[in-house]
């Protein structure tokens, strides 16, 4: 199915209507409004959600699901980058021992190595301690079902707590996913079979694509349980998921999953923010989880320290941080996942889409 301008404008208008009905912003929204010179009511309701502390870890509600998950999520992609599989397994288990429950992965990460390593780490009772998520690229029912079954084998489990359509980065992706014989039929089947508990989607390219995915899903009677997207100190200034998508998710009770808080280190290369500032900013947003890539023990320690020391940022702190990041963020130079194809794995491997 071809996406027309009329379809796109209709979807955008419908979503905008939902966002307009969301309550006024809290301190973080007021800070953003001050930064941009607009009223707080034009920005997302950015009150930091309630968290429950257990030991050094914080836990938040996963949207309307009734689940509680760790504020930090262990990103699966970085897990498969190292040549040392044993170290990757130790990282996963140490993270779980320190209270991290949200595990992120994908069928395509490192040609399956990330899922294989996580599957080994989740032996010996560790699987029962986590909320396990993975993603599939297939846009057809057959491809999606095959990828899911392969993920389950690699992860050594009979079910996923959350399965997401991965890399929804093109305006036509929602049409393919929800077409007759499309991938969402496979997710529906998997839920009925007990292979999957909750469903969602991810993407990193443009808020317009996320909005269209939500609109097409609604037309098919589907309300996702979770949506994953970039949320960081530079997103606030450029093609912002935080401004455009976040309020829609909150209005619908869909769990926002934040990723790319440091843009795979590119945001840090700007020289204007530190890792802890990046993590604390995204944690201050109304997200259920901040998924962060962890490939070394010291990076795990950094993530745990961010949770231990976290206090929601004040409006003044956010205003200062956004002022500091405004110029380097203006043209997306440090959010390469939005402005280049560097992060578009399905563009480099179109066969994965099926």
Image: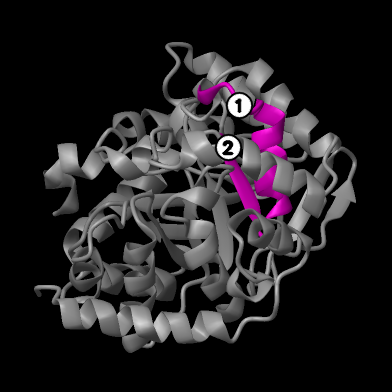
> Residue at the location (45% across, 80% down)?
16
Q: Is residue 110 above or below residue 215?
A: above
Q: CA distance from mark 1 to mark 2?
A: 7 Å
Which part of the image, by quadrant, shows the N terminus?
A: bottom left
User: Magenta residues?
Assistant: 270-292
* Left or right for 159, reference 147: right
Residue 140 within the magenta-colored segment of the rendering: no
> Residue at the location (88% across, 47% down)?
54
Say what secondary structure mark 2 lies in.
Answer: helix
Q: Is residue 156 above or below residue 244?
A: above
Q: Cβ–Cβ below 8 Å for labels 1 and 2? A: yes
Q: Position of residue 147 (x, y in %)?
A: 28, 50
Residue 282 within the magenta-colored segment of the rendering: yes
Say which quarter of the image contains residue 24.
Answer: bottom right
Reading the image, the residue beneath label 2 is 325
Q: Position of residue 98 (x, y in %)?
A: 78, 33
Q: Residue furthest top?
A: 83
Reading the image, the residue beneath label 1 is 272
* Left or right for 318, reference 289: right
Q: Position of residue 111 (x, y in %)?
A: 29, 31
Say which quarter of the image contains residue 115.
Answer: top left
């Amino acid at each position: 199915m071809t996406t027309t301008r009329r379809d796109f404008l209709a979807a955008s208008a419908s979503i905008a209507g939902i966002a307009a009905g969301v309550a006024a912003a809290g301190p973080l929204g007021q800070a953003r409004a001050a930064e941009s010179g607009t009223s707080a009511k034009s920005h997302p309701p950015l009150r930091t959600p309630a968290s429950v502390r257990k030991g050094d870890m914080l836990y938040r509600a996963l949207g309307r699901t009734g689940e509680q998950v760790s504020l930090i999520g262990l990103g699966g992609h970085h897990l498969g980058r190292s040549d040392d599989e044993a170290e990757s397994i130790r990282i996963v288990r140490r993270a779980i021992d320190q209270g991290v429950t949200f595990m992120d992965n994908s069928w395509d990460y490192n040609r399956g190595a990330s899922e294989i390593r996580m599957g080994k780490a989740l032996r010996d009772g560790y699987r029962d301690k986590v909320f396990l998520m993975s993603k599939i690229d297939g846009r057809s029912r057959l491809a999606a079902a095959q990828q899911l079954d392969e993920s389950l084998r690699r992860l050594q489990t009979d079910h996923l707590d959350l399965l997401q359509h991965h890399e929804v980065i093109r305006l036509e992706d929602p049409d393919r996913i929800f077409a007759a014989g499309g991938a969402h039929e496979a997710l529906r089947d998997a839920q009925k079979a007990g292979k999957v508990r909750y469903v969602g989607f991810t993407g990193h390219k443009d808020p317009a694509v996320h909005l269209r995915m939500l609109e097409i899903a609604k037309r098919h009677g589907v309300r996702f349980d979770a949506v994953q997207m970039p949320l960081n100190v530079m997103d606030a200034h450029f093609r912002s998921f935080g401004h455009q998508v976040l309020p829609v998710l909150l209005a619908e009770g869909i769990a926002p999953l934040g990723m790319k808080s440091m843009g795979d280190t590119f945001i840090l290369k700007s020289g204007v923010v530190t890792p802890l500032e990046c993590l604390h900013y995204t944690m201050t947003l109304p997200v259920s989880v901040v998924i962060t890539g962890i490939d070394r023990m010291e990076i795990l320690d950094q993530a745990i320290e961010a949770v231990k020391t976290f206090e929601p940022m004040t409006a003044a702190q956010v205003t200062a941080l956004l002022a500091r990041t405004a110029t380097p963020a203006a043209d997306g130079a440090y959010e390469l996942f939005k402005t280049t194809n560097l992060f578009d794995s399905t563009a480099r491997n179109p066969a994965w889409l099926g």
